[in-house]
Image: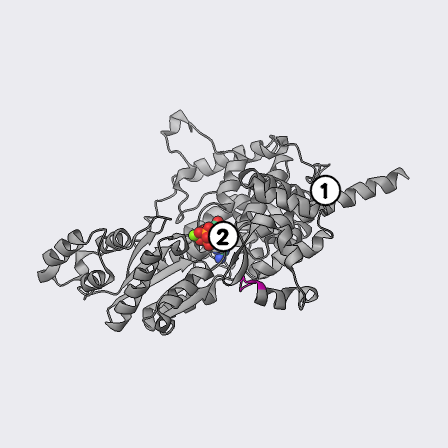
Amino acid sequence: MRPDSNRPGSFGRKELVMAKNRWFASLGSRSRHEELEPDDYGCEQEDPGEDSASGEENAETDELDQPEPCKELADGAKAGGLVTEQGTEGESRSLQVPEDQGLVWEPSAEDMIYSAFDASQPANQPVDLRGRDNELRTLLGAVLYRRNHAFIAGLRGSGKTSLLRVFGHLADRDGVVVVNTSCAKDTQFGALFRELLEQIPYSCVDPDKADLFESRVEAFGRDGTPLQAVTIAAMVEYSQVVMVIDEFDRVQCEEARADIAATLKLISDRRLPVRMVLAGDEASFVDIIDSHPSLLRHVTQVLTKPLEESAILSLFDICSSRSGISFSDEAKDLLVRTAMGSPYHARLFGMNAAIVAAGRGSKVVSEKDAYTGLAHSYQEWASINPDDATVFRRIVDGWHGNPARFVELSKALVSPKGSMSDALENAVPELRDREVTEELDAFGGALVHTKEGAVFRDGTAPQFLVALQAIGREHTRRKYASEEADV
Ligand SMILES: Nc1ncnc2c1ncn2[C@@H]1O[C@H](COP(=O)(O)OP(=O)(O)OP(=O)(O)O)[C@@H](O)[C@H]1O
Ligand SMILES: [Mg+2]
């Protein structure tokens, strides 16, 4: 993988100071989210609560590999400075124009928080990947030294692509050629492999055979077979090549899946200096192994399990140091519990909570901000997934009895195996040994049933159910609190 060119940050010291001043000015302005009406489950934004943590407290980061310029900018951000960073894909955060003309566009406080929390893009640098040292070590060891293929399996948003990207950077640094592609629903084997072969530099093949290599790649078309693909890959002599295939679970064509599995096997049997690393859900890993059971020996499975609490806290710390917004202990506690180990949800919930805090002019996210941030996150999700949102609202409203049962069940489904049987064993002892059909029925179409058990149709959904329940509980708590006050 060619590391993305790290463009130098386009802000100099002067711009940093200007941005810092704008940041302080914008803290007082109303945020987009503040203008949203909280729904029934939302929390009214009350007077700013006590800020129980300072920005400095959270500034420390446990860096795996933090480039120097990043540290310098983090200091700027700590002081309320600009949220940008050299060495990441943050180049779009600034527009550089001649000094005397000023900036034609200024990032708002919200923009800065968005880019610090970066919930919509995979992590790219080792420093951004928290709590995955073991997985990274396993992946590097398996692929570069044990010469195995690898399959990264995990739930949506658990960090598969992020792990792939950081792995790619580190492998590239080790002199390995990494080529990438990603699958779609209609992916066919020929087109997929052609894309990978085209990225292999000629320097990997014997110079006398470079023309032959080129012509073979050009001739490899939509109807290319695994055997032809491997014959071309066999021309690689002078480098180790790693072929990365992301989103493998999206491939619907069974023949394409089977061809990819066959290619893995052929590559291993021929001892080629070529390895493949795939990412997808656990069911698609099982699929690959089913079609070639002997692949179990050649493919190392790396699971992106829910992150440990300490990793999520460390993720908040790095986002805090970049945005200048820190979290009170109570807010962290609530967000960590609701994210349930998912880095995507942690970033999303943290981001929305930070925007609420900034909107009321604070640099510390209080527990109330965190509840409101969860409500906004839920609203955003519900607007794009109204069907599952309706199911969840009914559950939390008690249509099917005590909502806690359903929340526990959905937590179980997020557990490492992601499958009903093991998950229930581990996480919900009270549901063990009895039928959970009733609970499953209540989820309606939000759950789909696979060979391995039930999984959420939208893999990001369970955290939103937990968020909804947390907001609802808070809503109820407040309701009763005010009733008590009336008495
Ligand atoms: N270990 C981690 N530490 C911090 N942030 C992470 C980590 N892993 C992932 N993230 C963040 O979580 C979000 C989701 O990550 P990513 O896109 O890699 O997940 P994914 O499993 O590939 O998701 P999908 O299944 O939707 O493709 C991104 O914002 C990414 O930056
Ligand atoms: Mg991904």
- Nearer to us of marks 2 and 1 is 2
Tell me the magenta residue range.
Answer: 416-420
Q: Position of residue 285 (x, y in %)?
A: 42, 63
The quadrant of the rendering that contains the N terminus is: bottom left
Q: Is residue 178 left or right of residue 136?
A: left
Q: Is residue 43 above or below residue 270?
A: above
| Overall secondary structure of the magenta section | loop
Disc 2: residue Cβ within 8 A of ligand 1's nearest atom? yes
Is 419 magenta? The answer is: yes
The answer to which image quadrant residue 279 occupies is: bottom left
Residue at (64, 58) in percent of width and height = 437
Tell me, yes or no, if residue 451 can be seen here.
yes
Work out whether residue 372 or residue 96 is closer to the camera in this orientation and state it: 372
Residue at image mark 2: 157
Residue at (51, 61) in percent of width and height = 131
- Which residue type carries mark 1? Gly
Q: Is residue 160 left or right of residue 394?
A: left
Name the residue furthest top: 101
